Image (spheres, grey):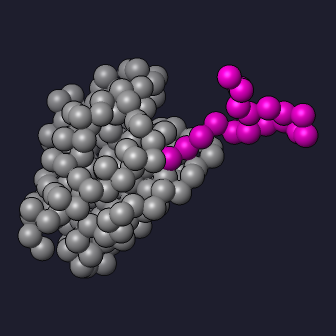
């Protein structure tokens, strides 16, 4: 798969998400990626640093444009821990864990992110505002409680299926509850 196509498809996915939710600096976006799936292989069987580099570059471009924080989910061998910037970890008060993701224990994407973020740390769990799942990596455990599916215009990156979600606060109350103030 051509690197440029992966980069462009990832940019389109980020743009679709931004149309559904205007993520800003205060928001956390969790990313789950199977680079194996992107190149048409079974998850966990053919990780690619080149694919990770293209996806990372497109995500960082989106982050630079919109300001959201990024969290890169590791694979199940690291219990789906997440790679984030230390500043993000400190901002949200997530407890740091000690491990370094590598391609065969963490995944190519998490490993790449760990080596290319400014000051990376790992945390066990987050409560993200939105998520992009490239290759059906199961990112739901890291979302706030009420997830709302978002249908991307670009449903695949390479050969990998893409799903996305944003979150909203829980609606509580009964028949008399009001959810929107009239102006």
Please state the total of marks drawn on the protein image: 0
For the residue pair 12 and 75, the one nearer the viewer reads as 12
Q: For the magenta stretch, what is the residue range? A: 166-183
In-image side of 174 versus 94 (left or right): right
Residue 56 x, y percent position in the rendering: 19, 49
Residue 84 x, y percent position in the rendering: 31, 36
Please identify the quadrant where the N terminus is shown: bottom left
In-image side of 45 versus 77 (left or right): left
Dominant SS type (magenta) = loop
In the figure, 103 relative to 111: above or below?
below
- The residue at the point 90 percent across, 34 percent down is 176
- The residue at the point 53 percent across, 57 percent down is 149
- Tell whether position 177 is magenta: yes
Which of the 4 quarters of the picture holds residue 181? top right
Which of the 4 quarters of the picture holds residue 3? bottom left
Residue 27 x, y percent position in the rendering: 42, 32
In the figure, 148 relative to 86: above or below?
below
In the figure, 41 relative to 79: above or below?
below
- The residue at the point 31 percent across, 50 percent down is 15
For the residue pair 182 and 53, the one nearer the viewer reads as 182
- The residue at the point 48 percent across, 56 percent down is 150
Residue 163 x, y percent position in the rendering: 43, 62
Please identify the quadrant where the C terminus is shown: top right
Residue 72 can be seen in this image: yes
For the residue pair 100 and 166, the one nearer the viewer reads as 166
């Amino acid at each position: 798969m051509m690197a440029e196509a992966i980069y462009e498809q990832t940019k389109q996915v980020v743009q679709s998400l931004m149309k559904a939710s205007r993520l800003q600096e205060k928001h956390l976006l969790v990313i789950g990626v199977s680079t194996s799936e992107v190149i048409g292989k079974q998850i966990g069987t053919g990780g690619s640093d080149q694919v990770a580099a293209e996806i990372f570059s497109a995500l960082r471009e989106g982050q630079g444009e919109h300001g959201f924080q990024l969290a890169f989910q590791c694979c199940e061998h690291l219990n789906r821990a997440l790679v984030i910037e230390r500043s993000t970890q400190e901002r949200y008060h997530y407890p740091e864990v000690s491990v370094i993701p590598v391609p065969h224990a963490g995944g190519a994407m998490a490993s790449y992110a760990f080596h290319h973020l400014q000051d990376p740390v790992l945390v066990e769990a987050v409560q993200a505002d939105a998520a992009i799942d490239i290759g059906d990596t199961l990112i739901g455990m890291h979302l706030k409680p009420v997830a709302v599916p978002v249908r991307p215009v670009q449903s695949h990156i390479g050969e990998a299926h893409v799903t996305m979600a944003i979150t909203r606060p829980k609606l509580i109350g009964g028949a008399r509850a009001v959810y929107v103030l009239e102006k």
